[in-house]
Image (tube, rainbow, N blue to C red):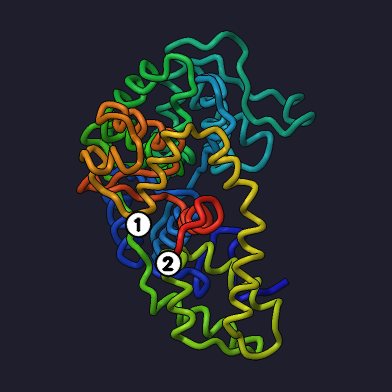
C-alpha cells in the first residue's frame, strides 16, 4: 500500500529527508577511493543515506557496482569470507557459468569453489573445498580489486553491522590481515563502507583500538532539521486530505529528537486514526500505540540492569553530567567514583547510553528515553 510515511525500509528520492551534506561528503570520499565508517543507533538512516548517495552518484553518470555483506549472523572468519565473496559474485554475475568463471579466474589459487550442485540445492554461489588457510583469506580480501580491474569500474563494498567482527575467533589477527590488504591495494578501484548500529562497540573498534588507522574516514549523521521534517509530514497528511498544525508537529520532532524513523512510524499511525484534522488527542493515542509496540524491547533493555546501573540511568535522565561529583554520588547512591566508571562502561556495553565529545551522556534511543522517564521511573516531563 502506498504511504507518504515510509518507516519499514530504506528510502530514496522524495521520501528521503535531510542529510544532504552527509550525502555529498560520502560521495566525494568514495569517488576519491577513500573508505568510510558510519556508526549511529539502529534506524538512524544509515542505509537510506547510502542508497540516496549511490542514487545521486549514478544520476551524475558515475559507473560502479555495490556489494553488501550482512554481518549480523556471522560468527567465524570462514562464514565472513564466504558471505563476503558471495556478495561480490552476486554483484557481478547472475548465471552459474558466470559465477564459475569468476571463481576460476579470480580465485584459482584458493580453496574457494563454485559447486553447481550446491547452487542448485540452496542457491549457494561459493563454498570451500578444504580447510581455510592464510592465502585463502588474503586472496578473498583482494577479490574486490581484481573484479574491478577486470570490469573496469569501481566496487563499493558495504560491511553492515561491522561491530560483529569481534565475534570472530582471533578477530584482531584477522583485522591486521584485512588492514594490510587495504593498505597495500593498488589504485582506488575499491572502497569499503563500514556500517554499525552498536555505537559504543564501533567506537571501541575505530576510536580505542584504532583499526584501519588512516585508512578510513568517519562520517557522523547530523540531526535532521525540524522544519524539513515538519514540511515532509504536513505534505504527507495533505495527500490523504488530513491537516496537522505545524506547531504540534514541531513538538513531535522535539519529542523524538528528530528521529525520522520514529516520526514516520508515528505519523503513519496518526494517518490511520483520523479522517480529518489531527488533534492533540490523536497524537497522544498514536504515541500510546507506538509505546505499546516498542515496550517489550524497552523492558528487555532494563530487565537485567542492577540497582546501581538504574541509578546512573536515572541520573542521566535527570540531566546530570558530572557523575563522579560528590553530590551526584550521594544523591543517587552510586557508591564511589570507581563504581561510577564501571557503571558507565556497563550502560555503554548494553548500548543504552553513549558519551559525546565533551563526555556528556546521551541516551541512544529517543523513544526509550521517553518511556524510561515517564513509565519506568515515573518522572515528570
Asked if marks 1 and 2 touch (Cβ < 8 Å), the reply is: no
Disc 2: which residue: 258
Which of 344 and 76 lies nearest the eye of the viewer?
344
Residues packed near mark 2 inside 10 Å, few (<14), some (14 to 19) or many (20 plus)? many
Is residue 194 something one can see in this rendering? no
Eye-nearest disc, 1 or 2 = 2
Residue 225 lies, in percent from the top left, at 36, 72
Residue in view at x 31 percent, y 28 percent: 339
Residue 97 lies, in percent from the top left, at 66, 34
Q: Quadrant of residue 27?
A: bottom left
Which of 207 and 318 lies nearest the eye of the viewer?
318
Which of 75 and 223 lies nearest the eye of the viewer?
223
> In the displayed structure, does residue 266 sit left or right of residue 327?
right
Residue in view at x 61 percent, y 59 percent: 291
Residue 313 lies, in percent from the top left, at 41, 44
Is residue 299 something one can see in this rendering? yes
In this view, 250 is above or below 299: below
* Image quadrant where one finds the C terminus: bottom left
Secondary element type, mark 2: loop
Residue 227 lies, in percent from the top left, at 39, 79
> In the displayed structure, does residue 124 sit left or right of residue 265?
right
Residue 344: assigned label = none
In this view, 196 is above or below 346: below
Residue in view at x 46 percent, y 58 percent: 379
* Image quadrant where one finds the N terminus: bottom right
- What is the spatial separation of the Cα atoms under label 1 and label 2, in whole angstroms? 12 Å
Disc 1: which residue: 221
In this view, 85 is above or below 271: above
Amino acid at each position: 500500500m502506498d504511504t507518504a510515511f515510509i518507516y519499514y525500509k530504506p528510502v530514496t528520492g522524495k521520501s528521503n529527508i535531510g542529510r544532504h551534506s552527509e550525502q555529498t561528503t560520502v560521495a566525494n570520499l568514495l569517488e576519491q577511493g577513500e573508505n568510510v565508517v558510519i556508526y549511529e543507533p539502529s534506524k538512524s538512516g544509515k542505509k537510506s543515506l547510502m542508497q540516496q548517495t549511490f542514487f545521486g552518484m549514478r544520476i551524475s553518470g558515475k559507473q560502479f557496482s555495490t556489494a553488501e555483506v550482512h554481518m549480523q549472523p556471522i560468527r567465524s572468519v570462514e562464514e565472513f569470507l564466504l558471505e563476503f565473496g558471495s556478495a561480490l559474485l552476486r554483484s557481478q554475475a547472475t548465471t552459474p557459468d558466470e559465477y564459475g568463471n569468476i571463481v576460476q579466474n579470480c580465485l584459482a589459487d584458493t580453496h574457494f569453489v563454485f559447486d553447481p550442485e550446491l547452487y542448485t540445492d540452496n542457491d549457494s554461489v561459493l563454498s570451500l573445498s578444504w580447510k581455510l588457510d592464510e592465502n585463502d583469506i588474503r586472496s578473498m580480501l583482494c577479490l574486490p580489486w581484481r573484479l574491478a580491474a577486470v570490469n573496469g569500474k569501481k566496487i563499493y563494498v558495504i560491511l553492515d553491522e561491522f561491530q560483529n567482527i569481534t565475534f570472530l575467533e582471533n578477530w584482531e589477527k584477522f583485522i591486521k590481515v584485512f588492514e594490510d590488504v587495504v593498505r597495500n591495494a593498488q589504485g582506488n578501484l575499491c572502497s569499503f563502507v563500514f556500517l554499525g548500529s552498536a555505537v559504543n562497540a564501533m567506537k571501541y573498534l575505530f576510536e580505542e583500538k584504532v583499526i584501519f588507522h588512516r585508512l578510513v574516514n568517519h562520517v557522523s549523521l547530523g540531526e535532521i532539521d525540524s522544519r524539513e521534517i515538519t514540511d515532509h509530514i504536513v505534505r504527507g497528511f495533505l495527500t490523504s486530505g488530513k491537516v496537522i498544525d505545524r506547531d504540534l508537529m514541531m513538538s513531535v520532532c522535539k519529542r523524538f529528537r528528530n528521529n525520522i524513523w520514529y516520526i514516520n512510524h508515528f505519523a503513519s499511525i496518526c494517518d490511520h486514526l483520523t479522517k480529518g484534522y489531527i488533534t492533540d488527542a490523536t497524537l497522544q493515542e498514536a504515541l500510546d500505540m507506538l509505546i505499546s509496540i516498542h515496550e517489550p524491547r524497552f523492558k528487555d533493555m532494563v530487565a537485567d540492569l542492577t540497582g546501581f546501573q538504574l541509578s546512573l540511568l536515572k541520573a542521566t535522565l535527570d540531566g546530570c553530567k558530572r557523575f563522579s561529583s560528590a553530590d551526584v554520588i550521594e544523591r543517587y547512591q552510586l557508591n564511589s567514583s570507581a563504581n561510577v566508571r564501571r557503571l558507565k562502561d556497563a550502560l555503554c556495553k548494553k548500548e543504552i547510553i553513549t558519551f559525546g565529545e565533551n563526555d556528556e551522556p546521551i541516551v541512544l534511543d529517543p523513544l526509550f528515553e521517553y518511556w524510561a522517564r515517564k513509565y519506568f521511573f515515573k518522572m515528570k516531563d
